[in-house]
Image (tube, rainbow, N blue to C red):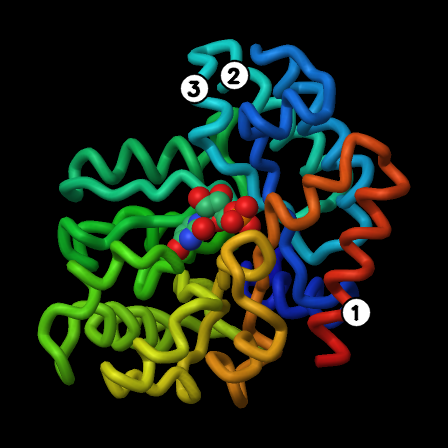
Amino acid sequence: MSSLGFGDRLADAIEAKGPLCIGIDPHVQLLEQWGLPLNADGVRAFAEAVLEGCGDHAAALKPQVAFFEQYGSAGMAVLEDVIAEAKRRNIIIVADAKRGDIGSTMKAYSDAWLGESPLATDSVTLSPYLGFESLRPAFDAAHSKGRGTFVLALTSNPEGKSVQHIGGAQSVAANIVDAAREENARQEWSAMGSCGLVVGATVADALEKLKIDLSSFNGPILAPGYGAQGATAADLYRVFAGIENQVLVNSSRGVLSHGPNLQKLAEACDMSREDLLNR
Ligand SMILES: O=c1ccn([C@@H]2O[C@H](COP(=O)(O)O)[C@@H](O)[C@H]2O)c(=O)[nH]1
C-alpha cells in the first residue's frame, strides 16, 4: 500500500476517475437476473464481473459485506479473494461492514478490516452508536496504516432519522460530523483526512432542518442513495455544495442491473459518471 494517507489516495482517485463508487452487491434478485446460482459460486462470478467491468471506470468499489456473509464461510472466502484481487489491480475498496462495538471488541474488528487479516482493505464503514470514541482502535489503525474509515452520520434510509435527528440543533448526526472533523484535525494530510462520513445523497432536507454545515468538513464523504434510492445528480450538488471534490457517490443496483455483460456494466458506469460531472 502507498505511503499516502487514505484521504489523499482517494482524492487522487476521484480526480483521475471521477466521483463514482460502484457497489458489489450480489442481491438475490440480481443473481437471478444475471442467471447465476444463489450460492457462493454465484457471488464469486458476480463479484468477478463487477471487478472486471467496473474496476477501471470508478474511483472505488464497495462490497456490501452482508451479501457475502449470507452464504457463511464460503461467501466470506469469496470476499477475501475479491479484496486480494482489488489490491492486485490497485482498486480502492470500501468494505461496507458497518462495524462498531465497545473498544476492546472494536480492536478485533479493526484488526480484521484495517489490520493484516485476509479481509483487511483500504477502508471500512463504521457505526458510531456505541459512542464515537468507542471506534478509537479503528481510527488509530487507519491512521498508522494509511487506511480510512467512513462513520455513519446521516444515512440514506428514511428510518435513520429516528436516531440521527435526536437533539434538534445539537443532533446526534451533528455531533458525529464534529467528532470526525476533530479526528482529521489530529492528522496530517494534504487534500483530505482519512476519517470520512456516510451522508446519504437523499438527506438535503435533513441537513437544512438540523442546520448541519458540511462546508468545513475535512474528510471524504461516502454518499449512497444515488440511482436506485431515487437521489439525482442535482440532489447531490444541493447536499454537498462546495465540497463536491470530497464526495464518493455510491451506486449499486443502478449500475449492476445492466450486467452481466461487461461492456454494458462499463457503459453504465461511464453514463453515471457523466451524469454526475455534467449536472
Ligand atoms: O446510508 C447508507 C449506508 C449504506 N448504504 C449501502 O449502499 C448501497 C446502496 O445500494 P443501492 O442499490 O445503490 O441503493 C447498499 O449496499 C447499502 O447497504 C446505503 O444505501 N445507505
Q: In terms of secondary structure, where does tag 1 sit?
A: helix
Q: In terms of secondary structure, where does tag 3 sit?
A: loop
Looking at the rendered image, the quarter that the C terminus falls into is: bottom right
Residue corresponding to mark 2: 75
When asked about the image quadrant of residue 38, the answer is top right
Residue 129 vertical placement versus 174 (above, below) = above
Measured in 3D between alpha carbons, the distance from the residue under mark 2 to the one under mark 1, in whole angstroms, is 33 Å
Q: In terms of secondary structure, where does tag 2 sit?
A: helix
Mark 2 is surrounded, within 10 Å at the Cα level, by few (under 14), some (14 to 19) or many (20 or more) other residues, namely many
Hey, which residue is sitting farthest left in the picture? 167
Residue plotted at (61% across, 32% down): 83
Mark 1 is surrounded, within 10 Å at the Cα level, by few (under 14), some (14 to 19) or many (20 or more) other residues, namely some
Q: Given contact means CB atoms under 8 Å apart, are the residues at marks 2 and 3 in contact?
A: yes
Could you say which is closer to the camera, residue 244 or residue 104? 244
| Nearer-N-terminus badge (3/1) | 3
Residue corresponding to mark 3: 70
Residue plotted at (15% across, 56% down): 131
Mark 3 is surrounded, within 10 Å at the Cα level, by few (under 14), some (14 to 19) or many (20 or more) other residues, namely few
What type is the residue that disc 3 sits on? Gln
Measured in 3D between alpha carbons, the distance from the residue under mark 3 to the one under mark 1, in whole angstroms, is 34 Å
Residue corresponding to mark 1: 274
| Nearer-N-terminus badge (2/1) | 2
**Residue 220 horizontal/vertical position (percent):** 50, 68
What type is the residue that disc 1 sits on? Glu
